[in-house]
Amino acid sequence: MAKGKELAIIILVTIITAFAIALTSSLSLDLNFFLIALLGVFLVISINVLAKKTTAYFLESEVEIKLWEIKRFGFKIGDTFKKSFPLGAFMPLISKIFFFALNGFVWMASIVFDVKAKAYRAAKRHGIYSFSEMTEEHIGRIAAAGIIVNLILAFVFYIVGGEFGTIFAKLNIWFAFFNMIPISDLDGNKIFFGNLVLWSFLAIVTLIGLGYTFLLV
């Protein structure tokens, strides 16, 4: 279950992302679309987080949700911010500048996670639990669980159809697409280094789904 700080981050990112999605080319806000996007984005993120936390539970670990931040802005020594920059809070709005023509398509990878093993994991002495540290493969599984759930929901709501069903299907695919990019601390990076085959499979499915979202009206 999300803690108070985690819930606050989810709500903040939801509002910013929904606002960016509903912003029109004339810089006015489509209020009806904003309310639908607000509900849709909140559900997309919440379900993704729930899938990660559930997977982490079965791997005897805990997941902490955080806002995506960056420290380094260049390749030279010293090219760092004094404090981590909350890039996740700005990317949906920044991306809108480039994606105005794509009808709501904005950056949605604004939340990342840290994972740590529970104390009693060290006491386990069987199979993959013969050590206490979380491996890259385990972290990749946790990240992949959220992406897989989003892809399944996208397919289900694409079949269901209707206005909300279509929008919700798109949001799940868009969320999966941006989070599958293997950079920084995003899910895609965790999956890529945890299991390249799994990342490749999910990337292909996500790209196919992304193509379909631009055909839906």
Image (cartoon, rainbow, N blue to C red):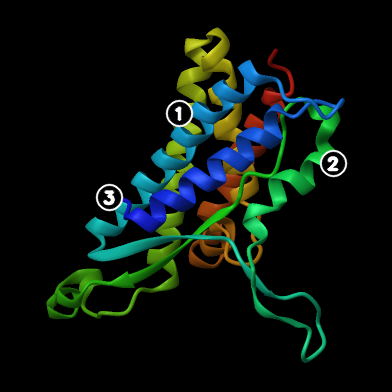
**Disc number placed over residue 153 in the picture, else none:** 1
- Specify which label sits upstream in the sequence, 3 or 1: 3
Q: Residue 78 at what x, y percent from top left? A: 77, 90
Q: Quadrant of the C terminus?
A: top right
Q: CA distance from mark 2 to mark 3?
A: 35 Å
With respect to residue 42, does 214 lie above or below? above
Q: SS at mark 3?
A: loop
> Is 89 left or right of 194, judged from the image as shown?
right
- Residue 212 location (% of width, % of height): 68, 23
Q: Label 3: few (<14), some or many (≥20) within 10 Å?
A: few
Q: Amino acid at mark 3?
A: Met
- Dot 1: within a 10 Å radius of its alpha carbon, few (fewer than 14), some, or many (20 or more) residues? many
Mark positioned earlier in the residue sequence (2 or 3) = 3
The three-letter code of the residue at mark 2 reads Ile
- Amino acid type, callout 1: Leu
Query: Does dot 2 land on a helix, a strand or a loop?
Result: helix
Task: Tell me: 174 left or right of 52.
Answer: right
In the picture, the disc for residue 1 is: 3
Measure how far apart labels 1 and 2 are at the Cα level.
28 Å
What secondary structure is found at the residue carrying circle 1? Answer: helix
CA neighbours of label 2 inside 10 A, class few (<14), some (14 to 19), many (20+): few
Residue 88 spot, x, y in % from top left: 63, 56
Distance from disc 3 to disc 1, alpha carbons, whole Å, reads 20 Å
Circle 2 is placed at which residue position? 97
